[in-house]
Amino acid sequence: MIKLGMLQNFCHCCAPSKESDDNMSKFLGLDSSTQSLTANLIDTKTGDSLYRTSINYGQELPEYKSPFGFLDNPDILVKQSDPLLWAAALDRLFHKMQDDGVRLDDIAGISGSGQQHGTVYLNRKFRTEGCIPQPGEDLATMLKSRLARPVAPIWMDSSTFDECREINKLLGGAEEVRRLTGSAATERFSGPQIRRFAKLEPDKYHDTAVIHLVSSFMCSLLLGHSAPIDYGDGSGMNLMNIQKMCWENSMLEATAPNLAVKLPSLVDSRTIAGQISEYFVREYGFRKDTMVTVWSGDNLNSLIGVGCWNPGTAVISLGTSDTYFAAMRKGALDPEGYGHVMVNPAGGYASLICFKNGSLARNKVREQYNMTWQDFDVRAFAGTPVGNHGNMMLPYYTSEITPLVLNVEKPVCEGSDIFCSGEDGIGTVRALVEAQALTMRLHSQWIGARPKTLRLTGGASRSAGICRVMSDVFGAVVERSPVCDSGALGAAMRAANSQDKISWKDLTAKFVIKDDSLAVHPIKENTAIYDEMLIRYKELEQSIVG
Ligand code: XUL
């Protein structure tokens, strides 16, 4: 077992004191996600979100040829991004904030949220010289000479089926990997991705001095040197012992040679990693003593941003991927291997299940039928009955993670063809959304009792039709989080909690507004229809997935 690094370097009680008290209440949360970089600036004195903005990679940085945040690849299982794009987005974001008149010298602290599992491979120059651009240089130009690998595999990658089997075998079975790391070896997780890289490009792997997650990589850019990885995002790697909170040597050895020396240290998610680098002071006028709290994974930040850091309410985040997550009261592991246990940055653990066919699938249906969001939401649900006349779909418009289904690009339909290929598409919309809710209910059963309350977040949570289906399928009250950037908000709240010692309870009361008039209550008769449908859904899934 490897010991924790020099924890005291990152201790959350050693922040230098600020010059004045006036400017200590503004905290910036950033969210480096698959398709965009988002900012949310909060003021803990007034309880306001002062400023929000987003840089969409495809639209605002087209030169990186990543319209959806990742590079084109002939192999549909391979999904990789250009880390230079993420660095360029950070510069672009601060320029935008300056142009919009945001006083960056007013910001006391920053933290962030990153798409989970993705890995960035950096060379010796990064380790020895850090990552502060020279005058006249920007972040992307500086970074070019510090990358050991020009691409970063991201969470959407499903190319590591063999590596997962190899890792599970080396550890004596998936169960042992799950017991140690909270998850069976999982295609998109960092460990299997690192193993594949070490196998396919051993020379480049050898030249890699540091391997970062997206979260710790972005944090490093802000600091100007290598940042630690927080326990939360560290638990999505298949490398961390989730009970002992340290790198698990047997996993490191089963993954790739010499991995221990390439990984940053692991720290508590409340750790202040240091002051912002001189680049941001020089270029954008940040104060020298703006402190940076370690970044964490996007779902874990969202847990805080929607106010569900305490057990009780499960969260459904409807984004590029759909995720189902909740703070955990007692430990449980998914015997089927799809669900994950991760460290909750607010303390304790959290369950997480990820479905790749989220907005990806919803958008495909909209495009297929040339529908507006309003058509999708209003017409489709009003025009079709609950249960869709018994028609059902497995929603695999692209390879799925939960359950694992590779090399698919078409949903599996049961029942009349009309609802999958009908001209107006309204039956298809209902079939898709019902399937998305049913698969969530089916694959979250390992966590324990069905939740009485669900909190929906993410763009698609604005859809009344989707909220109704979720509520009826789970037989639970659906609360709608008015916040669509819960990752960025959660990160800002984490910065305030670690740096200003404001409790989660106070932060939640100030920033997580919940409008009870928007709550959707389950209709018993509909839940009964879905209870029966769930049995059929499970059978259909098993007939395809095995
Ligand atoms: C979670 C997962 C995705 C990404 C999306 O395990 O893979 O939700 O975090 O950014």
Image (cartoon, rainbow, N blue to C red):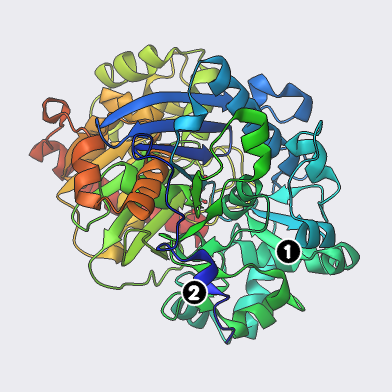
Q: Is residue 221 above or below residue 36?
A: below
> Nearer the N terminus, badge 2 or badge 1?
2
Q: Amino acid at mark 1?
A: Val
Q: Position of residue 545 (x, y in %)?
A: 51, 58
Disc 2 under 8 Å from ligand 1? The reply is no
Q: Amino acid at mark 2?
A: Thr
Is residue 68 among what the camera can see? no
Residue 176's disc is none
Q: Position of residue 105 (x, y in %)?
A: 50, 31
Left/right of residue 269 with respect to residue 462 in the rendered view:
right
Name the residue tied to disc 1: 210
Q: Is residue 267 above or below residue 497?
A: below
- Quarter of the N terminus within the rendering: bottom right
Left/right of residue 257 with respect to residue 372 in the rendered view:
right
Q: Position of residue 241 (x, y in %)?
A: 49, 78
Report how far apart the C-alphas of labels 2 and 1 lie in the structure.
Answer: 21 Å
Instruction: Name which quarter of the figure residue 263 lies in.
Output: bottom right
Q: Residue furthest left?
A: 524
Q: Residue furthest front?
A: 19
Is residue 113 among what the camera can see? yes
Left/right of residue 451 with respect to residue 169 in the rendered view:
left
Q: Residue at x 56, y 20 (%)?
A: 98
Compare residues 2 and 183 and report the one nearer the observer: 2
At numbered mark 2, what does the secondary structure look like: helix, strand or loop? helix
Graded by Cα atoms within 10 Å as few (under 14), some (14 to 19) or many (20 or more), the crowding at tag 1 reads many
- Give the tally of numbered discs: 2
Q: Position of residue 165 (x, y in %)?
A: 64, 73
Instruction: Name which quarter of the figure residue 106 lies in.
Output: top left
Left/right of residue 192 with respect to residue 541 in the rendered view:
right
Graded by Cα atoms within 10 Å as few (under 14), some (14 to 19) or many (20 or more), the crowding at tag 2 reads many
Residue 181's disc is 2
Q: Select label 2 or label 1 by which is in front.
A: 1
